[in-house]
Image (cartoon, grey):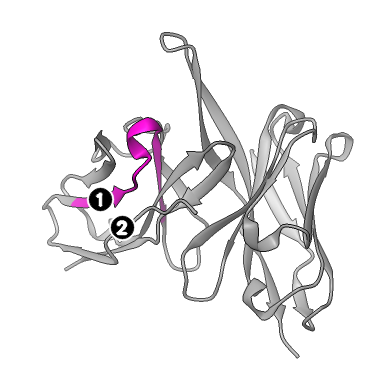
Amino acid sequence: SYELTQPPSVSVSPGQTANITCSGYKLGDTYTCWYHQKPGQSPLLVIYEDSKRPSGIPERFSGSKSGNTATLTISGTQAMDEADYYCQAWDSSTAVFGGGTKLTVL
Amino acid sequence: EVQLVESGGGLVQPGGSLKLSCAASGFTFSSYWMSWVRQAPGKGLEWVVNIKEDGSEKYYVDSVKGRFIISRDNAKNSLYLQMNSLRAEDTAVYYCARVGRYYDSGAAYYYYFMDVWGKGTTVTVSS
């Protein structure tokens, strides 16, 4: 089955830039969404179509893709951004999630 | 307000059955694909199943094929998940999610994403 690979954890200092990657051999042929999830809460869409932000999502969240790797970038990271982040792609009409990355803001 | 509210979770023995419901409000339910996504304790998100707007197409993750059945009642703005032959590994929080879409007219292509999520309902399979 299709898999998306994310680093288990990323650490960043407040105000710095965090980059979370997502790799999959089919990503170059499709698009990626990103979600964040804080403890005890439901996931929240932060990026769709590789780089578009839904309304209400701060500009410090951005997305990009190069080849088979998508990247979520959080500029000027704030303590409130500490959460689990998941990438997601579509494989035909089925969805696949990455394993998730725990972002720690030290 | 756009909202999804799941219900029907609980404790069930291995081999048992459970039916989850998801009540939608604040949007035209019949115009959207819908999904169920689950999260086992301490684990990541796992997509389970999708259903088309009119219920004519359904797609399942391999691990639940033949055991779970998704359905919808557009007149009642409701989504359902009938879960049979439950196993311990089905223990999870089950989320109902709306599959939103964006049409890129330049590319003549629809982009899909899960843009509205419920708070989830917990299913525990244990003897």
| Position above or below: A95 against A80 | above
Q: Indicate the secondary structure of the residue bearing disc 1.
A: strand
Q: Is residue A39 left or right of residue A104?
A: right
Disc with the residue nearer the chain's start (2 vs 1): 2
**Residue at image point 29% right, 62% down:** A82
Q: Are marks 2 and 1 in contact (CB under 8 Å)?
A: yes
Residue A90: give x, y in percent of width and height: 49, 40
As rendered, which of A2 and B8 lies closer to the eye?
A: A2
Residue labelled with disc 1:
A21
Q: Is residue A19 left or right of residue B42?
A: left
Residue B111 is marked as: none
Magenta segment: A19-36
| Position above or below: A33 against B60 | above
| Position above or below: B84 against A45 | below
Residue B104: give x, y in percent of width and height: 45, 15
Identify the image quadrant of the C terminus of chain A. Answer: bottom left
As rendered, which of A97 and A60 lies closer to the eye?
A: A97
Do marks 2 and 1 share a chain? yes
Type of amino acid at the residue the image marks with label 2: Gln
Residue B5: give x, y in percent of width and height: 71, 53
**Is residue A34 highlighted in magenta?**
yes
